[in-house]
Amino acid sequence: MKTTGDQQLVKRINRSVLLRLLRAQPGLSRARLAQESGLTKSTVSLLVRELLDDGWLCESGATMAGDGLGRPSTPLAINVGVRALIGIEIGVEVLRVVGVSLQGELLCSATEALDDGAPAAACRQAAAMVARAHAQLAQRGLALSGIGIGVPGAVDDLSGLVRFAPNLGWRNVDLMPLLMSALATAGVPTVPVQLQNEADAAALGEYEFAPEGEGEDPLVFVNCDFGVGAGIVLNDRLFVGAQGMAGEIGHTILQVDGPRCSCGRLGCAEAFFGARALNRPDADPARAGAFLGVLLQNLWVTFNPKVIVVGGECCAAHPELLEAAMQTVERFADAAAMPAPQLRAARYGALAPAVGAAAFALHEYLRPMHPDAGARREHQVQKSRRAHEGAAA
Ligand SMILES: [Zn+2]
């Protein structure tokens, strides 16, 4: 027997299928949506009605000739005038908050120095910034649909713990309850909040908010900040590894007996082009860029990605870093008589992790059937079941 919970999930999945089709191909009619999705026309009509009522979709005024049955058909599109998302990046010395439309248009942004790196204090400062961003969105008549937060550390997908954020000195921090309570105190409306590693978030930002509507896959995002990390989108989802640690490339070794890294090893990527290395008076960004090129070459042959995107504060501050890295990769490609991989700078520059966190909030709406989402739900069910059993005992 079907439970209400299953029916709700099926509905969410079907709604997400329609939303994703319309993101990729704006202007589809109900009939075309039925063809493309394999759902029945009556199901599509019902769901489209709901999505129109909820402000996710809009009908563009013009009607097209016909759908083959003699009826005029109305083109549908994602409604960018009703809903918006907020993204937060808690960086090592900085906080960034952005408001973006469902299509990734940057609507507002703010950057502040991080006053206090303790988790609760960082959440309070972030929540105050979110409240101001929310006020700006409300002035535009936009309702908040979700909040995403990116942090410079490994996030355990299942428990929601920030396992390890070495540059903030955090270990096993349960950030979500702190953030939720800070947001409530700051008067931010209750919406779904999603937590992710900053490089993973930035990768999703590039993927979900691709201008063509179809993200490049596989996509590797290399974030060069205090720490160096990579986010990997593979087969339409983030690849985070067994414990959320995939992409911790800042501590891949690029030179045996190289400079000492904050982790204790010698010759890590971060020791060449992390912010601490680049901020030294004797830093040579062009030479650091050559080492970044070595890292990109290694990622290229490991993943054979469609594109490698490079971003983060270090790239914004030192344009010659990426330039030198690209030349290095081209030299490697020439030597192997292969065409060089596609490399580009992050679309949102230093805001990439914050915009990406907002994209992650959207991603969770559009992919309710993801194994991760399923695992999280299962975890919640187990937790509430245990609580129930505890209460009954
Ligand atoms: Zn290291």
Image: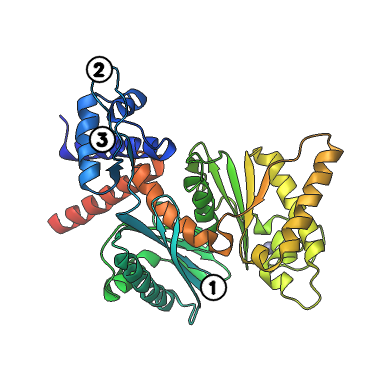
Q: Few, some or many C-alpha atoms within 10 Å of disc 1 (few <14, some 14-19, many ≥20)?
A: few
Point out the quarter of the image occupied by ligand 1.
bottom right
**Res. 275 in view:** yes
Q: Is residue 213 left or right of residue 18?
A: right
Instruction: Measuring from the top left, give residue 245's x and y in whole percent.
Output: 54, 53
Which mark, by number, is residue 169?
1
In this figure, which residue is indicated by the disc labeled 3?
10
- Mark 2 residue's CB less than 8 Å from ligand 1: no
Q: Amino acid at mark 3?
A: Val
**Res. 265 in view:** no
Q: Earlier in the sequence, mark 2 or mark 3?
A: 3
Instruction: Measuring from the top left, give residue 139's x and y in whole percent.
Output: 30, 68
Q: Residue most toward the right? A: 335
Q: Amino acid at mark 2?
A: Leu
Q: Are marks 1 and 3 in contact (CB under 8 Å)?
A: no
Seen from the viewer's position, the closer of residues 61 and 115 is: 61
Q: Few, some or many C-alpha atoms within 10 Å of disc 3 (few <14, some 14-19, many ≥20)?
A: some
Q: Are marks 2 and 1 in contact (CB under 8 Å)?
A: no
In this figure, which residue is indicated by the disc labeled 2?
69
Instruction: Measuring from the top left, give residue 255's x and y in whole percent.
Output: 80, 57
- Mark 3 residue's CB less than 8 Å from ligand 1: no
Question: Count of labels shown?
Answer: 3
Q: Amino acid at mark 1?
A: Gly
Tell me which corner region of the image, top left, top right, bottom left or bottom right, holds residue 97.
bottom left
